[in-house]
Amino acid sequence: MKRSLLAAGVLAVLPLLADAQAQNKADAKAKASIEAFTDANKAGADYQIQGEYVTEDNARRRYGIQVVAEGDGKLAMRALRGGLPGEGWDGSTEYKFTGKTTDGKVKFEGDVATGEIGGGTITATLRDSGETVRFKRIVRRSPTEGLKPPPGAVVLFDGASADAFDKGKVENGLLSTMAPGGINSKQTFGDCTAHVEFRTPFMPRATGQARGNSGVYLQGRYEVQVLDSFGLAGKNNECGGIYELSDPIVNMCYPPLQWQTYDIEYVAAKFDPAGKKINDAVITVKHNGVLVQDHVALKRDTRAAPVKEGPTKGPLHLQNHGNPVHYRNVWVVEKQ
C-alpha cells in the first residue's frame, strides 16, 4: 500500500517537473533571442539599415525619416514633415511605414508611399503622383559630445578610473553600471549642473522598458530616463523623460550605439527646519543639445529611486536595469 502511494506521488510530480523544465527552456530561449549588441561591427545587417535619413529636394518635399529595426529583418519607419526631431520637424505631421528584408532586398510600404532601402539610400515612390524621392542616411552628433569640464567641475568619469563611483567598473575605457542596484557617485551634490554621455545597446528584438534601459538620477532621487526609444512618440518613461513625471518636449533619442548627451541644470528641493518641503526640485534638461525639459518642478522622487526625497545632498546615481548601457565623460559642477 505504501509503495503504491509512493509511486502515485512520483507519477503526480513528474508532469510538474516536465512543465518546469519546459518553461526553463522557453525562458532561456527567449532570453537568448533578445541579444544586446555593444559593437556596431557585430550588430548585423539590420543595424546598417536602421538610422536617420534626410532629403532637402525642395521645401514641399522636405522630410526626415527614422528607420527602427525590430529584429529578423522587420523594420518600422516614420517620415516627419519638415525634417528630423530638433532639425525642422513640425512636431505633428508624420507618416508610418513597415518594412521587411526578403532575399537580401529591403522593401517598405505605407499609405502614402512604397519603396526600397539599400546602400545608405531610401528610394520612395509616392502613391498619389508616382514621383520618386530619395533620402540619404546620416549620423547626427550632439553639439555637446566631448564637452570638457569647466574649472571647478567634479570629474566623475574620464575613461581612466571608476573610483569616483561606488561599485563602478571600467569596460574598454567606458563606465559600466552593471552592478547590483546600479552605481552611486561617492561625492554627493546639491544644486548643480551635470554633463553625462551615454550609449544604449542595439537590442532589435526587445521592446519597451527592456530595450537599452538605464537612468540618470539627480541626488539619487529624480530619474532622467535612459532608454532606446529611437523613433517612438516621446513619453515620460522614454529617453529624455522624467520618469512618471514629465514627457520630453521632443523625442531627441538617437539610434542605439550612437553617443548621446544629457546637459542638466538642477535645483534641489528646499525644506524647512522641521523637514517639511517648501519648494520642489526643479530640472532643465537638454538632450543632444535640444531642450526637452524646461524648468520642470519635480513633485516627488522617482519610483525605485535609491535615495528618498529629503533635505540632504545626494549622489549622481546611474541605474542598472539589466541592459549594457555605457557612460563616459561624466562631470558635475556644484553651485554655491
Image (tube, rainbow, N blue to C red):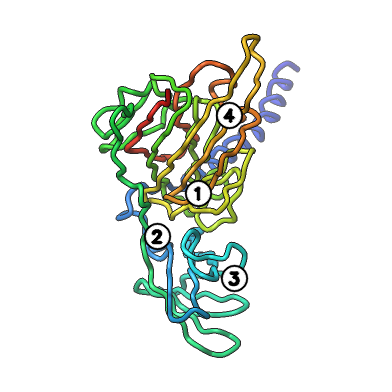
- Residue depth check, mark 2 versus mark 3: number of the one nearer the observer: 3
* Amino acid type, mark 2: Tyr
Residue that sits furthest to the top in the current view: 274
Residue receiving disc 1: 291
Does label 4 or label 2 sit earlier along the sequence?
Answer: 2
Does label 2 or label 3 sit earlier along the sequence?
Answer: 2
**Residue visible at 57% across and 36% down?**
21
Question: Pointer 2 and pointer 3: residues touching (CB < 8 Å)?
Answer: no
Residue that sits furthest to the front in the current view: 336
Residue receiving disc 4: 281
Residue in front for this viewpoint, 4 or 107? 107
- Residue depth check, mark 4 versus mark 3: number of the one nearer the observer: 4
Quadrant in which the C terminus is drawn: top left
Is residue 284 depicted above or below 161 in this figure? below
Residue in front for this viewpoint, 2 or 268? 268
Does label 3 or label 1 sit earlier along the sequence?
Answer: 3
**Residue visible at 55% across and 84% down?**
126
Q: Is residue 99 left or right of residue 289?
A: right
* Amino acid type, mark 4: Ala
Q: CA gap, disc 1 to disc 4?
A: 18 Å
Does label 1 or label 2 sit earlier along the sequence?
Answer: 2
Q: CA gap, disc 3 to disc 1?
A: 24 Å
* Amino acid type, mark 1: Leu
Q: Is residue 139 left or right of residue 2?
A: left
Question: Pointer 1 and pointer 4: residues touching (CB < 8 Å)?
Answer: no
Residue neighbourhood size for the residue with mark 2, other residues' Cα within 10 Å, grouped as few (<14), some (14–19), many (≥20)? many
Q: CA gap, disc 2 to disc 3?
A: 22 Å
Residue neighbourhood size for the residue with mark 4, other residues' Cα within 10 Å, grouped as few (<14), some (14–19), many (≥20)? many
- Residue depth check, mark 3 versus mark 1: number of the one nearer the observer: 1
Residue receiving disc 3: 95
SS at badge 3: strand
Residue receiving disc 2: 47
